[in-house]
Image: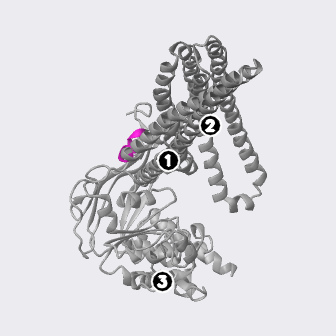
Amino acid sequence: MSSQGRSSLGYLRPYRAIIAGGVLCLVATNAAYIGVAVFLKDAVQAIKDARGIADIAEVMRWLSLPASPAAALEDWRRVHTAHATDAAIHAVELLVLFAVVTAITRIFSRVWIFNAARAAEYDLRSDLFGHALSLSPGYYRDHPTGDVMSRLTNDVQVVRAMWGAGLVHLSNAVTSFATVLPFMLLLDWKVALIAIIPYPLIFFIGQMLSRRIYTSMRAVQGELGGLSARIQEDLGAIQVIKTYGLEGLRREGFIASSKRLLDKNMVAAIVRIQLTPTLNALASSAVAILIVMGGRAVIHTDLDVGEYTAFAALLARLVWPTLTLGFMLALVQRGRASWSRLVALQDEVPAIQDGHGEPLAATPEPAHVVVKDLTITIGERTLLDHVSFELAPSTVTAIVGRTGSGKSTLVEALCRLIPVPTGSIAIDGRDITDVPLDSLRAQIGYAPQEAFLFSTTIADNVAMGYGAGTAIPAARRAELERVGAAESAPDLSDAPRVTAAADAAGLTRDLAVMPDRLATIVGERGITLSGGQRQRVALARALSAEPRLLVLDDSLASVDAETERVILANLRRVMKGRTAVLISHRIAAIKDADQILVLDQGKIVAKGTHAQLIGQAGVYRDLYRTQLDTEFEIRDVG
């Protein structure tokens, strides 16, 4: 369904009972306000009657009546004045009572409706984030992360405001007219009909301007997403910007993007500015009509002063919902613009569909993988071309090739991080497209070429390999206490799987010089660690999963030769009883593999052992000789 056809109100459905309670409170608020108007009428009328009695008595005294009639007149004045005073006091007491009821029901209506909107916002954001996690990595290569972040934050908040404040004002306007207007018609239907003449005009003008608001706000939200993406990119690349002195250039780009956002905001503001004053003027004209027509009715005794006062109070009750109509329409149009962006995100179909077959058997046996005629094409570019090979259980397979030959694409296909054709890859005799993704990936330990670390402890980063890491580590105790999760964040720095994986990844010597060792917080993206340390933490994460299939994509590229030798020795021990795939641009790191696959331009051009391949002319021998020549040159320079 399109973004225009799909309603956002579905998220409010679970809270319809709470919302109904809030709307009923608004009905009670407006009904109670009728009581305010009625007793205001009675109080004013009682005061007017008392004043009339006093005026009559004053005239009689001026006429100098005889003593007996004068005494009788005074008694009459005293009795009727007391009666009118009592009536006024009683009316004021009831007026105050109804005013209190009005205030209490109004408070409850806002609390219930706003709380329902907050709960629906939580549901919406949770669904959106869950859907964002289901999208393939390829989606985030094509869509700026900052724009996705803007949708999950700014756009969700705008939709929540539409649900909360928009629903309150809409319900208030409907219930106000539904309860107040009939009572006005009972008082004097002629004056009531003439006084509300501007209101249909208010509706049509509001509708016309609201369409323009929607268009302008859609442009604003889109530009805001682009600006968020630029900020996220620049802050993430701050080291590169400072290294190459790009501050001025990036600042100019930011100012230009910010200026475009300002221009679109100004267009939207001009449209919104036209709305509220226009509606205010039309609402004020209704008051002017009442003064003219109601005053005329009072002069001709068609209306009492008390009834006129009640009429004015009731019309004033309609003025506020009318004035907020402009705000409500602008809010709804902003919400619709944001909702359309959220629906566009929800409509993104994951490129990698979950398998619907049975999960893989939970067994410690090493995986058996067969790749048959695998072809990966993106656009018009073929990344892998009819690739076929077998990963026998408990073997180590190395993949080498020049830059851009398709090595990383191949291992991403093995992990199903990119779409793969049906029947091209099988694990334990099962087509991986038929295996549920969580079951497949639970049996694979993957250390990608670019190591990403979360802003938590080293231990938590490692433990995430087997699902035991926490979003907030125990080391950040104050933050945990603030969110009430102090008891749910265990310290994983002594967990056996974590320590064993860290040792196998060659982190022991580095941890020894860190005061908090595995409890060290690495900062955003692991910024406090070196490139080699980040790669080894990512390697430890893959090892901690104790996978049946271990996939290492150039995971030793940033470590020195001595550390590499230590890690390789550890890996030989760890990889026993596991099937492993190892990518490395260093021949020394993969020469002991059981089989070596040589990729060139997306095709396997050779396969065999190290001894077999160096005896054949081709890519492998060329790479080997190039690395030997480089090593000799380095030694000569040394």
Q: Which residue is mark 3?
A: 493
Q: Where residue 474 sits: x, y (%)? A: 51, 78
In the rendered image, which quarter contains the C terminus? bottom right
Q: Where residue 265 sits: x, y (%)? A: 67, 36
Q: Which residue is mark 1?
A: 114
Which picture quadrant has residue 293? top right
For the question of whether residue 522 can be seen, the reply is yes
For the question of whether residue 324 can be seen, the reply is no
Q: Nearer the viewer, residue 434 or 149?
A: 149
Note whether 453 is above or below 9 in the view shown.
below
Residue under the image location 68 percent in, 39 percent down: 261
Q: Where residue 452 sits: x, y (%)? A: 52, 66
Indicate which disc, 1 or 3, sits on the residue closer to the N terminus. Answer: 1
Front label number (1 vs 3): 1
Q: How many numbered callouts? A: 3
Indicate which disc, 1 or 2, sits on the residue closer to the N terminus. Answer: 1
Residue under the image location 55 percent in, 79 percent down: 475
Q: Which residue is mark 2?
A: 220
Note whether 43 is above or below 570 in the view shown.
above
Q: CA gap, disc 3 to disc 2?
A: 47 Å
Indicate which disc, 3 or 2, sits on the residue closer to the N terminus. Answer: 2
**Residue type at the position of mark 2:** Val
Q: Nearer the viewer, residue 324 or 258?
A: 324
Note whether 370 is above or below 277 in the view shown.
below
